[in-house]
Every structure is written in C-alpha cells, then in structure tokens.
Image: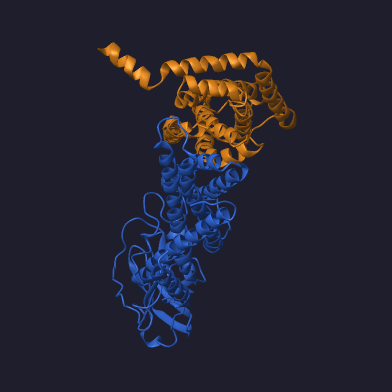
Chain colours: A blue, B orange
C-alpha cells in the first residue's frame, strides 16, 4: 500500500477514535416516573440527560403532545436533571399515547417520544378543542454534539465502530471473490482440458493466496462486527443475542468463511487447494449476499435498515454523525486493505522460504 | 424446423447425457442395495425412537423439528457416498465420455429423487407413529409440498458440497462443516414454511417462503453447473 494511504489511514483512525468518543451528546430526556396520564390534574417527574433545568429555570416550559398539545401549568426544576411537572388535561383525550416536550433557553426543545399512556377509560374518538403549537427552540449546542435518541442514548457512538466493521468485511470478501474468479479465469485460459504448465500454474496461485488473505482478515472484521453488535444489542434490546434474521445471518456468514479456512486446511496439494477453495469461495459469497442483504429485507427485524431501507439512512441525516461516520468507514476500509496486504505478503514470504516462487 | 430446435435445446441442456447418467446411478444404487437399506433402517429406527420417547407430540414446532432433523441427517447420510460409490477409475472414464456439467446435473437429479423418496417415507412413518394431535389442524398437502421443494433444494446443495468434500479428500466431518452454513438459508425458509403449514395457515401466508426456496434451489443448481467443471478437473 502506498505510504500516503497509510498516513491517511492512521490519521483517520485516530480522528475517529478521538471524536467518536469525545464529542458530547446534545441534551435529552430519558424518562418519566409515571407511565400513564388521566383527565384532570397529573403530577409527574421528568428526567433529563446533560440538561440544564436549574440553570435556565426562568425559561422552562413543558408540554404534552398527543393529537393536541397541552401546556403544563407548573414546571419546577428540582435539579439540572430533574423536573417536577403539573399538567391539567381535559375530560376527553383522543390520543392513546403522548410525548413529552421540555423547552428552555440552554437546552432548546427536547422531547421524549411516546412517553405516557393515556388511561384507557379516558380515550374518546374525535379531536379535542384548544389546539396550540409547540414553539421549537434550538439548543446552544446544535452544531456540536451527537443526537440524543431514546433507547440508544450514548451508545450511538457505536455507530462509528459497529457499522464500518461490516462494510470492511464486505469489502474484503468482495476482494476475495474477485481473486477467486481471477484464479479460475487463469485456469480457463488454457486450451480445454489441458492442465496448466508448471510455471503458469504456480504464478496463478498468487490469486489464491490473495483470496485466502482477504478472507482471513475479513473474518477478523466479522468477529469484531459480531462483538460490537452484541454489546449494542445488550444495551438497547437487553440481550446479548436476539433471534433476528440479520443477527443469525451474520453468524452464519462467520461459519461460512470459517469453514472456508477449514477446507483450506484439509487439502495438502497447493493447486488442488486453490481450485477447491476458489469454488467454495464463490458459493460462499453468493450465500453471504443472500443472507445479509436479501433475506433480512423481507422479514420483520429489530435491526435498523430492514424492510426496504438502507442500513444507515436514519442516522446520516445528522451532520455531527456524518462528520465522524464517513471518515470512520473510509478509515476502517483502508485499514482492512492494509492488513490484507500485510497478510498476503506474509503468506508469500512463508512460501518463498521453502521454494522459489516469482 | 421445430424438431431441429428441439434437438438443439436437448443438446444444450445435456438431456441425453443426464438421462444416461441418472440411469447409471439407479443401476449403481441397485447393485449396492445394502447402502440404501442401511439408510432406510436408520430412518425407521429414528422415528421409532422418537415414538418411544415422546409417545404423542402435541406441539407443532416439536413435530416440525423432528421431521426436519430426520430429513437433514437422512440427506447427509444418503449423499455422503454419492461420489465415493463409484471409484476413481469410473470417474476418469466418465470424464472422457461426458461433460462435467452433465455429471453434476445428473447426480443432482438422481439425488433429488432419492431424497424425495426417503423423506416421503420418513414423513409417512412420522404420520403413522406420531401423527395424532398434529394432522387434525395441519394442512398436510401444503406440508408435503414444502417437503418436496425442500428435499429437492437440500439434495442439490448437499450434492455439490459432497463433490467438494470428496475432492478435498473426504475427511469425515468436512461435509458437515462445509454443508451446514450453506444449507441454513434454505432450512430457515423450509422450517418456517412447514410450521405455517402445520398450523393450518392458508397458502397465501406461505407463498413467499416457497418463492425463497425456489430461488435458493435454482441458484444452487446454476452455481453448481457453473463451478463444478473446475472441481472436476485434476
């Protein structure tokens, strides 16, 4: 790999490592102490994360939003992260579930979607009277901070680690399958049925070594992707593993390529190993595309990016995430390519140690 | 003119060669009857052990799992010898006679028939011993359709993997290691299809799974036809 690319790769990785962990989250709401609202007087607490309720208590406002917006009469900051709210709701409520909004000058408008259930007896059809709008304010950090998403919270930083692992794995497996096809084409160029002569047969093995190197590095990224994904799943879905088509597919892809390594280990003869593993590699790549890119699109899944949407479109709307995510993808792909080159050179050296190979 | 076209299509699709190879497989199987008998006994004893331990299965998922576990192991057992049965010499002889593509397609066709037969047999045994409590609500025609399509798909994929494992020295376990990840997508949709059928859901619920099975099977056959000639040459 060109030294300039190495420098770019290393500095991008440094940038990503620093910024993905260091950029602060924008303020947000984490929850309420009650889960249900009823007609009449409601009092509940609202909890914030990185908020400044006491500091800017003068400008505090709170709303509930269902089909209409209800202004909360009493909002008192207990601390920077805790609010006591009183809200009087009308006798008829049409929305079954409500979101909570809090406004102040420092944090801007922050909200907790679908936070409160309406007591079942109170729901009636038809719109309520007295509609008003939330005046949306910007926070002082708008240009500076990762978006605060419910459920995900701080773990949104994992976006810069988990997702590029899979991109890199795909990139490496693609290199690998291209090398395998190249090997087969080299074999085919000879007149039909006739074996390659010794010299060109040995030079064609370069593609085989490259394919194997790409798979072994790709497998490492696959393992890292599974680990980071598992940690993320524990945080957001409360389980290390869920029975999800995307997750199961990823595990099967790991098994597919692990058995590629096993297949290589069982065959002694160089050219035979090259031929067999090239055949299996092409088969495995098609299976991987089916498992990770086709099947999960048609099945209900918790994993983002399913049912027709690409995997990261919901995040890349936000500029602060984009500023770290795109460099992260570039950095990890470059890093994967670098490792693949090293792996290939090591295997070439290992073979030339025993016999002379051009 | 149409006759000529027909001849041409037959030639491209290797009909004649495949038919001859399938006939050869039948004869080979017939001469080695003991191998097939072994698998039949395996199926009978598996189902009978299930019956002895469970007596009666009321849960649809358990029943489906038993049927498919039996089916998978039957397929692996039956097709493990598919390349071994004929020695190196026969394969060299075949290589001079027909194209490699015809060899794999012929084997796939024969194995699909064999696996279909064995799986139908094991399904019949399951219905005989453990059918009570399941057949009342299940749509058995639908289930059988799933079994047919699934068996064909399994046979196609396992045949290809068996060829790969055979060329890699046929070390024990290699076929299972290579085959398991490759079969998973097919198995997932087959199992889902069967469960829907056993629960008695209408066909419209299952059409998509059938499509997935079909696409996977066809792609496996095409890939095998494309790649097998490279496996075959020495």
Q: Position of residue B204 (x, y in %)?
A: 41, 32
The one of A251 and B35 positioned closer to us in this rendering: B35
Quadrant hosting residue A241:
bottom right
Q: Quadrant of residue A105?
A: bottom left
Closer-to-camera residue (A153/A120): A153
Q: Which quarter of the figure has residue B55?
A: top right
Viewport quadrant of the N terminus of chain A:
bottom left
Residue A324 placement (x, y as % from top left): 39, 70
Residue at x-position 70% and y-position 28%: B46
Residue A311: where, in percent of width, then height? 40, 56
Q: How many marks?
A: 0
The answer to whether residue A152 is visible is no
- Of all residues, the one furthest to the left in this rendering is B1
The residue sitting at 46% across, 31% down in the picture is B229
Nearer to the camera, B82 or A194: A194
**Is B4 left or right of A244, judged from the image as shown?**
left
Above or below: residue A305 compared with residue A112: above
Write the residue at 42% across / 66% down. Answer: A331
Residue B24 appears in the figure: yes
Q: Nearer the viewer, residue B57 or B144?
A: B144
Residue B115, image x, y percentages:
57, 24
Whether residue B65 is situated above or below residue A88 in the rendered picture: above
């Amino acid at each position: 790999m060109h030294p300039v690319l190495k420098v770019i790769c290393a500095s991008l990785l440094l940038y990503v490592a620093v910024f993905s962990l260091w950029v602060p989250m924008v303020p947000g709401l984490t929850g309420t102490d009650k889960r249900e609202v009823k007609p009449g007087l409601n009092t509940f607490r609202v909890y914030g994360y990185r908020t400044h309720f006491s500091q800017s208590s003068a400008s505090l406002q709170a709303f509930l939003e269902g089909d209409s917006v209800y202004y909360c009469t009493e909002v008192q900051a207990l601390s920077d992260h805790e609010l006591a709210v009183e809200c009087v709701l009308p006798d008829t409520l049409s929305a079954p579930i409500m979101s909570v909004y809090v406004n102040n000058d420092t944090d801007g408008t922050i909200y907790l979607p679908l936070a409160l259930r309406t007591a079942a007896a109170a729901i009636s059809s038809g719109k309520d009277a007295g509609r008003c709008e939330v005046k949306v304010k910007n926070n002082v950090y708008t240009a500076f901070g990762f978006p605060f998403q419910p459920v995900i919270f701080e773990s949104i930083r994992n976006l810069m680690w988990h997702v590029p692992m899979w991109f890199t794995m795909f990139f490496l497996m693609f290199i690998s399958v291209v090398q395998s096809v190249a090997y087969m084409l080299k074999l085919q160029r000879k007149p039909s049925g006739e074996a390659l002569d010794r010299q060109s047969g040995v030079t064609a093995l370069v593609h085989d070594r490259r394919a194997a190197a790409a798979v072994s590095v790709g497998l490492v990224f696959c393992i890292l992707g599974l680990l980071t994904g598992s940690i993320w799943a524990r945080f957001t879905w409360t389980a290390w593993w869920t029975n999800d088509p995307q997750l199961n597919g990823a595990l099967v892809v790991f098994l597919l390529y692990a058995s590629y390594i096993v297949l290589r280990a069982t065959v002694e003869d160089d050219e035979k190993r090259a031929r067999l593993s090239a055949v299996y590699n092409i088969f495995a790549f098609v299976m991987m595309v089916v498992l990770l890119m086709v099947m999960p699109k048609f099945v209900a899944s918790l994993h983002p990016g399913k049912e027709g949407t690409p995997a990261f479109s919901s995040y890349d709307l936000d500029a602060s995430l984009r500023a770290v995510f795109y460099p992260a993808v570039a950095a990890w792909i470059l890093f994967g390519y670098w490792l693949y080159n090293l792996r290939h050179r090591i295997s070439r050296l290992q073979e030339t140690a025993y016999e002379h190979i051009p | 003119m149409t006759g000529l076209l027909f001849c041409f299509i037959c030639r491209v699709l290797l009909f004649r060669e495949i038919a001859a190879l399938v006939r050869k497989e039948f004869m080979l199987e017939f001469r080695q009857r003991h191998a097939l008998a072994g698998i039949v006994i395996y199926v009978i004893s598996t189902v009978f052990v299930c019956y002895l331990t469970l007596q009666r299965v009321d849960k649809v998922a358990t029943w489906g799992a038993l049927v498919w576990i039996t089916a998978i192991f039957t397929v692996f057992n039956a097709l493990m010898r598919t390349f071994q049965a004929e020695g190196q010499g026969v394969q060299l002889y075949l290589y001079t006679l027909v194209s490699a593509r015809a060899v794999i397609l012929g084997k796939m066709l024969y194995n699909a028939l064999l696996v279909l037969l064995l799986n139908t047999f094991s399904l019949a045994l399951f219905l005989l011993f453990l059918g009570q409590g399941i057949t009342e609500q299940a749509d058995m025609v639908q289930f059988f359709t799933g079994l047919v399509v699934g068996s064909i798909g399994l046979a196609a994929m396992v045949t290809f993997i068996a060829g790969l494992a055979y060329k890699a020295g046929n070390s024990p376990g290699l076929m299972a290691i290579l085959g398991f990840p490759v079969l998973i997508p097919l198995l997932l949709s087959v199992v889902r299809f069967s469960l829907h059928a056993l629960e008695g859901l209408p066909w419209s619920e299952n059409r998509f799974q059938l499509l997935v099975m079909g696409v996977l099977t066809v792609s496996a056959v095409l890939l095998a036809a494309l790649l097998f000639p490279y496996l075959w040459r020495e």
